Structures are given as structure tokens and as C-alpha cells.
Image (tube, rainbow, N blue to C red):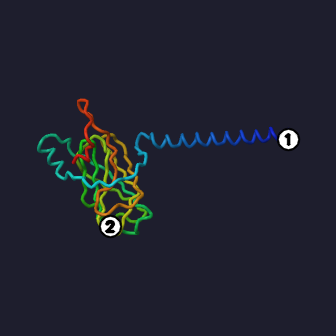
Amino acid sequence: MVKLLLPKTLLHVLSLQFLLLLLLLCVSWGSSVVVSSGSEIVADHPPPHELRSFTIRENLQKEGEETGRGRGSCSYTVKIRTSCSSPRITRDAISLAFGDLYRNEVYVPRLDDPSSGTFERCSTDTFKIKGPCGYGVCYLYLRRNGWDGWIPEWVQVYDPYYSRTVTFYYSTSLPNGVWYGFNQCPRATQTGTTAADPISRM
């Protein structure tokens, strides 16, 4: 009796192992398709962090025009998804700043508009923003001032330099009154010396 059951048991075990292997291959293939898409850059979902020393460069466009170092003005499309865990509406004041390794920075002091239903729960809002041209968006921070506790899910920025969309994932509440977000900029190297982080040195 044992001799008859043993081959069937082995066959069953091998079949399960084969199915598990197929499942792992499918998952790996699907993940690589999402990450390596040519039109969208999906980060490895690092957690956002607080940045107390962040100094906004509000006059960057004017400085570039006066010194001749600016690359001109570019148009950015920014999409912000509000979490379904967020309050139904928010009266919080929401600010946005993003830029590249060299601090070519786009700054928007106020994105919110409660009268138009901006940042309602489970909604996606799109903004057309003019700002200084850069060399690839690699950092982004949001600032929330208020007591409603608005919660973003993600922020997408269309990067005109690389003609692609960069996504920053939040899915967590923002601390009140501080800049909160991501810095994925590489460390710049000049004449063999690694420079400090472009944000933390401000």
C-alpha cells in the first residue's frame, strides 16, 4: 500500500513546487515591468522624512535671469492623490517644493483651495506649475499647516527634462508645520570630491 502511495505523494509535492516557482516568476516579471517602465519612474517606496533645515529658494528664477545662469522657465504637471483615510475635506494650507540636484527649485506657497474642493478624500488633483528648468526632479517636499490632518497618498511630477513622470509615495499623515518628503538626489562629485547633500547644506 505504501509503495502505491509514495509515487503519488512525490508527484503531488513536485507539482506544488512547480506551481510555486511559476508564481514567483510571474510576480518577479510583473514587478520588473512596473519599475522599468520608460515613461514612469517608481521609487523603492522609501519612507518620507521630516526636514527642519529646508530653506526655500523663492527668488531662484529671478536670480537665474539676472546672473545668466538660469535655464529658463519650464512647465510642470503635478498630480496629488489624497488618501481615502484623509478627512472628507481639508482647510489645511498645503505648500509644495521640488527640484533637482543643483537646487533648481519649484516652489508653490499654497496649493489648497477649500472652495473648489481641492484635496477632498479619495480625489486626485492636477496642477500646472511654471518654474525654473532643472536636470531631473529628485527631491520633493510638502508642508501642511492646519488642524484637519490632510493625508496625501502620492505625488506625481512630470519631469520635462527626462520626459517622464516621477512618483513619490506618502500614504501617511504629514506633521504640522514642517517640510516632509523625499530626497533621492545622488551625491554630486566634482574633481574627485563628493559634495554634501544639496538640501541639508542649506
Disc on res. 48: none
Q: Point out residue 76 in the picture as x, y percentages from the top left corner.
A: 29, 49
Q: Amino acid at mark 1?
A: Val
- The front one of 68 and 55 is 55
Image quadrant holding the N terminus, namely top right
Can you tell which quarter of the image residue 198 is in?
A: top left
Q: Nearer the viewer, residue 64 or 184?
A: 184
Q: Quadrant of residue 114?
A: bottom left
Number of disc labels: 2
Up-down: is 193 above or below 121? Answer: above
User: Label 1's element?
Assistant: helix
Across and down, in percent, residue 100 comes to 28, 44
Q: CA distance from mark 1 to mark 2?
A: 74 Å
The residue singled out by tag 1 in the image is 2
Q: Residues within 10 Å of mark 2 (few under 14, many from 20)?
A: few
Residue drawn at x 29%, y 54% as measured from the top left: 51
Query: Which image quadrant for residue 159?
Result: top left
N-term mark: 1 or 2: 1
63 or 177, which is in the foreground? 177
Residue farthest left in this picture: 66
State the image coordinates of residue 118 (x, y, percent, origin top left): 34, 64
Q: Nearer the viewer, residue 137 or 21?
A: 21
Q: For mark 2, give the secondary structure.
A: helix
- Tag 2 residue: 116
Up/down of 179 relative to 32, above or below: below
* Amino acid, disc 2: Ser
